[in-house]
């Protein structure tokens, strides 16, 4: 565990905020944790913080007084929130929970972001590395806070982080060995203001000080970032379901390699439980990461074939009177919905007859 400043303020008392407060307290800091919600919203779940010596303030509209050396903010806290504005005016250095927790782990890291496909790709990479015998933990936006991993004490051989734009907003020194950018389509514009600003925030995952850093990036997302004059200092590996110029591409149901010893067919999507060009891209991204971490093609293909996707992602839900019902309720934006419909179309040999239940 790295050293921490003496006096730390944690803002936001969801799962990630509580984990950050406990991590800071475990490192010997004097910790104050604040949330704008009333105490009744937590149903006694803050007792563990108080037991660890954390001072807890609920119903907070401005930051507590205390001469803080550092503020750790939860990803759910919008920059437009009163507490965040109060923090900005204070001059206290700010770090996000993801970066705070990651800085205390010290494991080789791959970080995955994008508008859609983050969780599937995170799970695929974790499954690949685990099946290859590498002690691997998946954390971040997937549900387990990075600070909780750091509290566990044991350092994993590999850390796989799913990272949202909310988490990337506050990164300053976050620098994984391998970064993955799956795609960019308009999302969270109520928070970020424009697609261009959203893309620039996503691109933070690609900034680096490492000379050996690698970026695995969808070709279309790369082209959009370049149109915004965003520089990418990492060595690039590209993938695409729509362009044969990428290092990995998708053609006639096959994941294809475009160069070197990965030239030609690598895997048939029909051999997996995943469907659609978007899932082919998730597989390509995962395979590119596995290669960087020393896995053989045979190991990766075997792992992809045995991977079971999480619930609510193009999940068969039953059949009634010849009608097949598919649950894709994880699609929470238009791009995700359209990709699911395209995947359904590709699975039906005859003229597709798809009825969409949305909302």
Image (cartoon, rainbow, N blue to C red):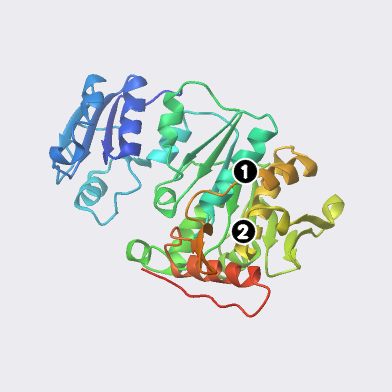
Image disc number at residue 178: none
Horizontally, is 70 left or right of 66 in the view? right
Contact (Cβ within 8 Å) of mark 1 with mark 2? no
- Percent coordinates x, y for residue 284 in the rendering: 68, 54
Residue found at the far front of this picture? 321
Residue 20 appears in the rendering? yes
- In the image shown, does 339 or 122 lie closer to the viewer? 339
Mark 1 crowdedness (10 Å alpha carbons): few <14, some 14-19, many ≥20: many
- Closest to the observer, 36 or 200: 36
Q: Which residue is mark 1?
A: 125
| Image location of residue 14, percent across then percent down | 29, 40
Q: Nearer the viewer, mark 1 or mark 2?
A: 2
In percent of width and height, residue 355 lies at 48, 75
Q: CA distance from mark 1 to mark 2?
A: 13 Å
Is residue 43 rendered to the left or right of residue 328? Answer: left
49 vs 181: above or below: above
Q: Which mark is residue 279?
A: 2
């Amino acid at each position: 565990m790295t050293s921490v400043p003496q006096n730390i303020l944690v803002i936001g008392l969801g799962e990630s905020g509580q984990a950050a407060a406990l991590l800071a307290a475990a490192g010997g800091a004097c910790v104050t944790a604040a949330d704008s919600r009333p105490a009744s919203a937590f149903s006694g779940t803050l007792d563990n913080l108080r037991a660890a010596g954390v001072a807890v303030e609920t119903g907070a509209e401005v930051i507590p007084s205390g001469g803080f050396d550092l503020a750790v903010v939860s990803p759910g806290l919008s920059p437009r929130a009163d507490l965040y504005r109060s923090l900005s005016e204070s001059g206290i250095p700010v770090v996000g929970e993801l970066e705070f927790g990651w800085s205390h782990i010290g494991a080789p890291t791959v970080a995955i972001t994008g508008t859609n496909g983050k969780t599937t790709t995170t799970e695929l990479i974790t499954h690949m590395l685990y099946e290859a015998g590498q002690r691997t933990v998946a954390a971040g936006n997937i549900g387990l806070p990075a600070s909780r991993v750091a509290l566990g004490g044991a350092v994993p051989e590999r850390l796989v982080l799913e990272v949202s734009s909310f988490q990337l907003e506050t990164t300053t020194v976050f620098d994984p060995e391998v970064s993955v950018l799956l795609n960019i389509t308009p999302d969270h514009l109520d928070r970020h203001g424009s697609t261009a600003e959203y893309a620039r925030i996503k691109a933070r995952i690609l900034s680096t000080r490492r000379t050996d850093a690698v970026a695995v990036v969808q070709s279309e997302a790369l082209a959009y970032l370049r149109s915004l004059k965003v520089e990418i200092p990492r060595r690039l590996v590209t993938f695409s379901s729509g362009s044969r110029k990428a290092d990995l591409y998708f053609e006639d149901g096959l994941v294809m390699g475009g160069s070197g010893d990965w030239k030609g067919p690598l895997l048939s999507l029909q051999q997996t439980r995943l469907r659609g060009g978007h899932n082919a891209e998730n597989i390509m991204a995962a395979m590119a990461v596995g290669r960087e971490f020393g896995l053989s093609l045979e190991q990766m293909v075997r792992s992809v074939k045995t991977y079971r996707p999480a619930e609510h992602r193009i999940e068969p839900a039953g059949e009634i009177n010849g009608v097949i019902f598919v649950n894709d309720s994880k699609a929470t934006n238009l791009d995700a919905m359209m990709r699911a419909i395209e995947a359904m179309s590709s699975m039906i040999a005859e003229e597709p007859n798809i009825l969409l239940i949305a909302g």
